[in-house]
Amino acid sequence: MSILCGVPLLECVYCLACARWAWKRCLHTAGHDSETWGLATAEEFEPIPRLCRYILAVYEDDLRHPLWEPPGGYGLKPDWLILRRTYEDTHGRAPPYILYLDHDHADIVLAVRGLNLARESDYAVLLDNKLGKRKIDGGYVHNGLLKAAGWVLDAECDILKELVEKYPNYTLTFTGHSLGSGVAAMLALVVVLRHDKLGNIDRRRIRCYAVAPARCMSLNLAVRYADVINSVVLQDDFLPRTATPLEDIFKSLFCLPCLLCLRCMRDTCIPDEKMIKDPRRLYAPGRLYHIVERKPFRLGRIPPVVRTAVPVDGRFEHIVLSCNATSDHAIIWIEREAQRAMDIMVEKDHIMEIPAKQRMERQETLAREHSEEYRAALQRAVTLSVPHAYSPSKYGTFDEVEEGEDSNRSSGESSFGSSKTSKIRENWDELIERLFDRDVSGHMALKKSQRDG
């Protein structure tokens, strides 16, 4: 009898717990993820709307006669387009991409398009992974995205090296959306590791902007490469927030809302400390830029605000239950809201009438603040016992190199430290050989077909 009397009490406790969970989850909005972050400035955010338009340009068949250009156009000059690769050129090994020489901004840009729902080859890239399958540089990455990046770099290595050496003052920027963001992030990682393939390019010349990023690298790598890789997230975008492996997400694409709700319930029951200490768990890479343009209990959109940080914990760990979770993933909306945010920043700067000298000083201060924030994130990763995380003193920063602590080290060695370099490089050669192992006859046939075409 006593047991039967306790059943209603247990039911009440269970119902109250479920009600509390639902209340917290429904009130949790995307703005909470970045409410403690700092505001981005116009100088650091300037490339993002422009690169979004470059990504959109990959979808066009003929840039001289575009069909889908946004208001104001793509901002591309067709004569500066170096090459364009389609699915026929890549044979499904990687998404389509373009290589553009941007003389106006002193930039060499490789832009990769996002997932094509009608292409089985794109799904093959996503499905080529298992949790903990690929390890590189002391962390885990998505195997299919890494192989796609390896194919692109192997195919375009010669022309990239030629451009990097011909224009020594130009930056090298990799950018992409969704699936392409993962490929771009992996390209940046591999080029930093194998900088000798592009004429020993300085790490400071390499940049990556991952738009609506896929979770493609473990936490230690995501923080370590925050000085190179930048991720852009619009409000409630689901992809950077769900830790479900990409292969499982797109297997369940047609019942995606059900999957997100189940994942949301599951993640609520897992402590953040346990998530952080899982070395195989993948995250959105690098420094994060969060565009916030909606507030709870308000109709319509507000003027977008851009916040940025290099977080270690609280790195978009919880899915937002929102009807905009999928629409905020669209590159068209991201470009539109990024441009609106940029216009607001420029207008504020114009009203303040900042002198040119003061603007330069602000840029130097911004670079110094980013360096300090990057170093603090590395130290916090060690404090939180993130697997394979290194403290800043072990592999150095560029500020230390510039101060002359070890000016004779190469750019690659200054990134990883003399104490770790020799051991790591012994294993890198074998890893990279596997990564870039290609069928020679097939590669030559591809090159021949491109020349004949």
Image (cartoon, helix red, strand yellow):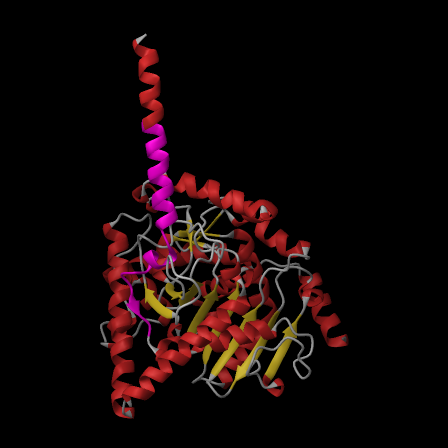
Where residue 326 appears, x then y in whole percent? 52, 56
Quarter of the image that includes the C terminus: bottom right
Q: Residue at x 45, y 84 (%)?
A: 168
Quadrant location of residue 251?
top right
Where residue 110 appears, x then y in whole percent? 54, 73
Magenta segment includes 114 = no
Q: Is residue 107 above or below residue 7?
A: below
Q: Give the range drawn in magenta.
A: 13-40
Side of 310 where 144 appears, left or right: right
Q: Residue at x 22, y 76 (%)?
A: 403
Q: In this view, does 149 lie above or below 83?
A: above
Quadrant location of residue 344?
bottom left
Q: Does the image show residue 407?
A: no
303 and 143: which is toward the camera? 303
Q: Does the image show residue 180?
A: yes
Quadrant location of residue 64?
bottom right
Provide the major secondary structure of the magenta segment: helix
Q: In this view, does 411 lie above or below 318?
A: below
Where residue 36 appears, x then y in whole percent? 27, 61
